[in-house]
Image (tube, helix red, strand yellow):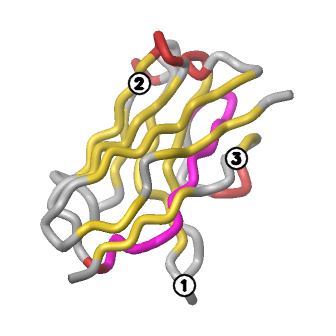
Amino acid sequence: QIRLVESGGGSVRPGGSLRLSCAASGLTLDYWAVAWFRQAPGKEREVVSYINSATTNNGGIYYADSVKGRFTISRDNAMNAVSLQMSSLKAEDTAVYYCAAKYGGGSVIRAEYDYWGQGTQVIVSS
């Protein structure tokens, strides 16, 4: 069975940092585009970042404008995982964060992703 499992969420004060991880089983993530989405209460799920496979668009990376300069997406192929390092967190970053995998190039469109994790909660508050 193909599974994606997020971890690393929690509660942090504004300005703090968290590192989320998306670990896969049943597929090799390096062959897939992997995205992080988030969904805050009362809002639609939105893309935060994605990273292409190494053979698609040279492994290119996308960041939403709202997180540029603060978040970094990266692969840990030895662990078959993709991480999202989040720094300088703001209250508006509070959301459930999901990872997703898509064959081929990455996309900002939720419906184009094939596999999803269960989500991990991030709360940024004082």
Q: Residues within 10 Å of mark 3 (few under 14, many from 20)?
A: many
Q: Secondary structure at mark 1?
A: loop
Q: Residue at x 37, y 43 (%)?
A: 84
Estimate the spatial distance between the alpha carbons at disc 3 and disc 1, rounded to whole Å.
19 Å
* For marks 2 and 3 on the same chain, the one whose residue lies earlier in the sequence: 2
Residue 122 horizontal/vertical position (percent)? 42, 65
Estimate the spatial distance between the alpha carbons at disc 2 and disc 3, rounded to whole Å.
17 Å
Q: Which residues are magenta?
A: 92-105
Q: Residue at x 50, y 78 (%)?
A: 40
Residue 126 horizontal/vertical position (percent)? 21, 83
Please report contact status of discs 2 and 3: CB closer than 8 Å, yes or no. Answer: no
Q: Is residue 116 above or below residue 40?
A: above
Q: Amino acid at mark 1?
A: Pro
Q: Residues within 10 Å of mark 1 (few under 14, many from 20)?
A: few
Please report contact status of discs 3 and 1: CB closer than 8 Å, yes or no. Answer: no
In the rendered image, residue 72 lying in the magenta stretch gets the answer no
- Count of numbered circles on the image: 3
Q: Amino acid at mark 2?
A: Arg
Q: Secondary structure at mark 2?
A: strand
Q: Residue at x 60, y 56 (%)?
A: 119
> Badge 2 is on which residue?
75
Location of residue 125 (image quadrant): bottom left
> Badge 3 is on which residue?
116
Residue 45 horizontal/vertical position (percent)? 58, 69
Residue 101 horizontal/vertical position (percent)? 64, 37
Q: Is residue 112 above or below residue 4?
A: below
> Badge 1 is on which residue?
41
Q: Amino acid at mark 3?
A: Trp
